[in-house]
Image (cartoon, rainbow, N blue to C red):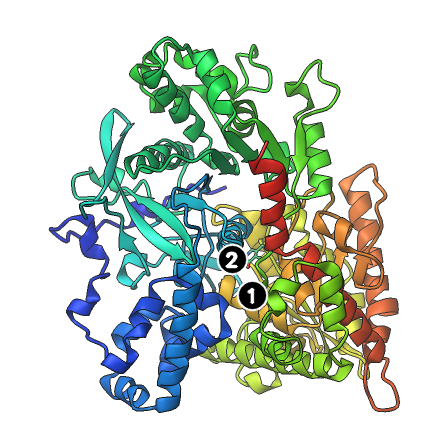
Amino acid sequence: MEPYNPAAARSLPDTGREGTAYFRNDFEFFRTLPEELSALDRLSRNFYWSWHPEGVELFRELDPDLWIECEQSPRTMLRNTSDLRLWQQAADREYVEKLNAFAARFDEYISAANADTNAKIAYLCAEYGVHNSLPNYSGGLGILAGDHLKSSSDLNVPLVAVGLLYRFGYFRQDISHDGWQEEHYNDVFETDLALTPVVDASNERVFVNVHIRGRVVKIQAWLAKVGRIPLLLLDTNLAENTETDRYITGHLYGGDSETRIVQEKVLGIGGVRMLRKLGIAPEVFHLNEGHAAFSTLELAHEFIEKNPDADFASAISAIREQCVFTTHTPVAAGNDVFSPQLLMECFSADYFAAMKAEKEDFIRLGRVDPTDETEPFGMTPFALRMCRTANGVSEKHGEVSRGLWREMFPGLDEVPITHVTNGVHVPTWIASAFQRLYDEKIGKGWHELTRDADAWANAVNNISDSDIWTTHRTLKNLLIAFMRERTRRKDTGERDTINERSDTSRLCSPDVLTIGFARRVAQYKRWNLLLTDLERLLRLVDNAERPVQFIFAGKAHPQDRTAKQILQQLMSINHDSDWQDRAVFIEDYDQEVARYMVQGVDVWMNVPRRPHEASGTSGMKAAMNGILNFSTLDGWWIEGYDETNGFAVGDMRDFESDAEIDAIEAEALYSALENELVPRFYDRDENGFPAKWVAMMRNSITTLTPMFSSDRMVRDYLERIYTD
Ligand SMILES: *Cc1c(COP(=O)(O)O)cnc(C)c1O
């Protein structure tokens, strides 16, 4: 691992004003919209538009090219669309009618919000992937949190979310000519974020303080509206803070251990203080992953302040009743651990003195074995001790987590860790072309039907095979056009890697079986499993009658050289073969790229080494679009796969060594491609129609949508986790 410090590479611009100066949320100051279009301003301030095809179209139609250029950010659109385009739209009766109809739907949705405005549930997470125009996530955890908020909004759950606002977000990826990943950061403050400053009842900005590195750090909050759900994003970028402290909320996962601790202090301790300052008294605090676990400490701190007779132990047992924890990591090494020394430095003795405790009492709570002085402090053991309930994110992951943390519960027959299987937000991930088909064939209420397995299956069974296939073909062409466009924009005329071509029109064909593979480049995801036998792979790709093509995307951790080498190996396959035209890597995997891919390929491949995939969610997104999963039996796929709705790589057997399991599953991967997927996809009836394939697509849509929707997930949390 190379030392890596993005913060060192840049310094903060001096605005001479408070942090708010970075945000041009008051841009009406320099831009007034035509009266006919005034609803656009209101719509742009709530992410509701992003999960409704009509909402997306309203902004895109303003100027389709600009929409791509400003990366689907409505606020940036409203600032940059030309006066001519604005007035053209204002003069277009049809557009204005569509706009007002959508705005009325939005207003109705918001006004039907839960009457009890004091949120019962506080949801805390280090990242949120609500939409690309709020680049505040790195991957699966963030997207899951975003989907949790959207379903909570749709189901009218009284929930408030707390996170951090990362000024530079997560890194953006470029691939160089020699196939090496390079990183850069965008300053998100330069874009127009759909955020408003958090203010109190008298319209004054609200601030809280947290002690960090011997200084008082001042924290402000921004409000992002996710439908009916408020998302509070904490930010230390205030002129009153030292430059170092202003960087606390600078980069998502960009810093060292110390940065992590201070970020987690802001999230946990600052988060609780901010909620209190706003008069919010949740009944449940949901720690989504261990990053937010310091919140429990602040709750104990608060409890003792209010109950001076209580001691540390009784405070913990009292606040424990309010806290619930979701773990997302199936391997010990994946959990956040900190050296006791570092923790000692990051917390002041006064903080614990107020709780009648020593720092050592606290450190012990983060050890599997509290008496083992050599053990580091783990956020997962700490959260497990501080919360009344804990859960993994799939059935298998629940079981794996019980095994992992067994030692923490000596004397108990059953480890008290359960599971709630993850899900994804149906209207965010189902392609708008399918949503329009459902509107027409099932009716506008189709989304509600996805909450009932039988009703959903019946409804979808009224849609013809040819409608499903035609819609899919359109989406596949859309993906190919998107991919060619992205590749053309990158084209420099050199042809060193699979990423650069002079003629993008030859890249991929809509008639060829297309396999999508997009995920983090991490060891256990086994990117190179597919490359185990290159000759066999190229025989599949080069087959004249029944070829196969691949679309890849994914980021490697900036400090992980091995992962970057895997990417480079993939980029460098440059044989005398069709590979160059039938394998594409789309750079800078994000929510937008993910959406095109999970809606447009034929097959979604996933080959994690069992049991390292806690759940996985991208396959769920694909499944709902009739994309057939082709995956090892790990995470959610163990629950989802029924032999008729997708394909399995290998089986559930365990083996002695990683090398052995990799060899066996590589063989299983090739033979399934050769003997099942390729023949099935190219099996056409007398009309040239792939009836057997489409039957599987239908099964994927009917069986997997209700099971893996985040509506189902949020209901599970409501029934089994939030209420005790
Ligand atoms: C859904 C999603 C993920 C999570 O995918 P898995 O590989 O299945 O864990 C990661 N990144 C983005 C951008 C996503 O949309």
Q: Which residue is drawn at 75% across and 77% down?
A: 462
Residue 475: image x %, image y %?
62, 78
Ligand 1 placement by image quarter: bottom right
Circle 2 residue: 154
Q: Which residue is drawn at 71% across and 28% down?
A: 403
Q: Residue 344: give its label.
A: none
Question: From the viewer's perspective, is 404 left or right of 168?
Answer: right
Question: Who comes first in sequence, dot 2 or dot 1?
Answer: 2
Badge 1 local density, few (<14 within 10 Å), some, or many (20+)?
some
Circle 1 residue: 427
Choose top left, top right, bottom left or bottom right for residue 29.
Answer: bottom left
Q: Residue at x 40, y 44 (%)?
A: 163
Question: From the viewer's perspective, is 697 left or right of 189?
Answer: right
Residue type (three-letter) at the residue carrying disc 2: Asp
Q: Is the C-beta separation of discs 2 and 1 under 8 Å? A: yes
Residue 567: image x %, image y %?
58, 58
Is residue 299 visible in this depiction of the protein?
yes
Q: In the rendered view, would you say 262 is above or below 422?
A: above
Residue 439: image x %, image y %?
60, 77
Q: Which residue is drawn at 81% across and 85% down?
A: 689
Question: From the viewer's perspective, is 136 left or right of 379?
Answer: left
Q: Which residue lies furthest to the front in this view?
A: 115
Q: In the rendered view, would you say 115 is above or below 86?
A: above
**In front here: 604 or 77?**
77
Question: From the viewer's perspective, is 705 left or right of 649?
Answer: left
Residue type (three-letter) at the residue carrying disc 1: Pro
Residue 307: image x %, image y %?
36, 14
